[in-house]
Image: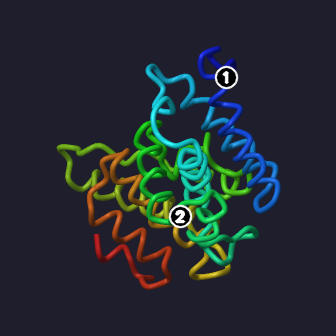
Amino acid sequence: MKIPSQMQEIYDDIGGMIVQYCEKYLSEEYKTLCLRLLEKLCRKRPSPLLSGKKNTWAAGIVYAIAANNFIFDKSMPIHRTADELSRPFGIAPSTAGNKASEIRNLVRMSPWDTEWMLTELVDESNLKIASFPKKSENDELFSSRKKQWCRTTSTTALKHRPAEPFGAGAIRTPLVLCWCYTTHKCDKKAIKVVFLVVSGILNDWQNVL
């Protein structure tokens, strides 16, 4: 991605801090994601990077990418605390967190946007969720289709359920169900049923719908 000439110096300064941090504490892939985010911010018109401290932007970018990849989860291969993400840049965790939130809003970053995810998480989160059936005049037919959706969605989600009950994957399971609800306009009871099945709480789910 080409950097606008007027932003090149800012990119080099912020990018240098990001590269130094990622090479010391994170990974090559983290560095790639952070620099990609920096490039995107440089190309916005006007670029938000034109105001504010460069070290705060660098910390915010790293914090945004890291948080989006569950870096605070101790089960992750690379685990860092908010303090460890921010102090090397010379700022407080609250400042880095606030800047990260601003950045996420600027680029509309979400936990399910694979553009900002590590490869290992993209593979784990690649759930094939079918569209929720549309409401039909035939209530019996709609009920049958809804049960089928719950069955297939539960089966798919169970295949991706992690061995660790409180690992990063466990966090993503309710997230994907929330995504199903907002994207496919599923009814709340169907989503609740799938969540309970995936959580191992509910077995005889057909009588609930």
Q: Please state which of residues 114 and 20 is positioned toward the viewer in this rendering.
A: 20
Please give the count of numbered marks on the rendered protein.
Answer: 2
Q: Which mark is residue 191?
A: none
Q: Residue tagged by mark 1?
A: 8
Q: Quadrant of the N terminus?
A: top right
Query: Can the viewer see residue 176?
Result: no
Q: Which mark is residue 172?
A: 2
Alpha-carbon span between mark 1 and mark 2:
37 Å
Residue at 33 percent of width and 49 percent of height: 182
In primary-sequence order, the first of circles 1 and 2 is: 1
140 versus 135 height, above or below: below
Q: What secondary structure is marked by label 2?
A: helix
Residue at 65 percent of width and 78 percent of height: 74
Residue 77, position as x, y percentages in the image: 76, 70
Q: Amino acid at mark 1?
A: Gln
Q: Is residue 62 left or right of residue 92?
A: right
Q: Is residue 124 left or right of residue 154?
A: right
Q: Please state which of residues 11 and 174 is positioned toward the viewer in this rendering.
A: 11
Residue at 62 percent of width and 30 percent of height: 10
Residue at 51 percent of width and 50 percent of height: 129
Q: What secondary structure is marked by label 1?
A: helix
Specify the quadrant of the image occupied by residue 16. Answer: top right
Q: Nearer the viewer, mark 1 or mark 2?
A: 1
Residue 131, position as x, y percentages in the image: 42, 44
**What crowding class fits label 1: few (fewer than 14 Cα within 10 Å), some (14-19), or many (20 or more)?**
some
Residue 162, position as x, y percentages in the image: 65, 73
Q: Amino acid at mark 2?
A: Arg
Q: Please state which of residues 196 and 117 is positioned toward the viewer in this rendering.
A: 117
Residue 111, position as x, y percentages in the image: 51, 53
Q: Quadrant of the C terminus?
A: bottom left
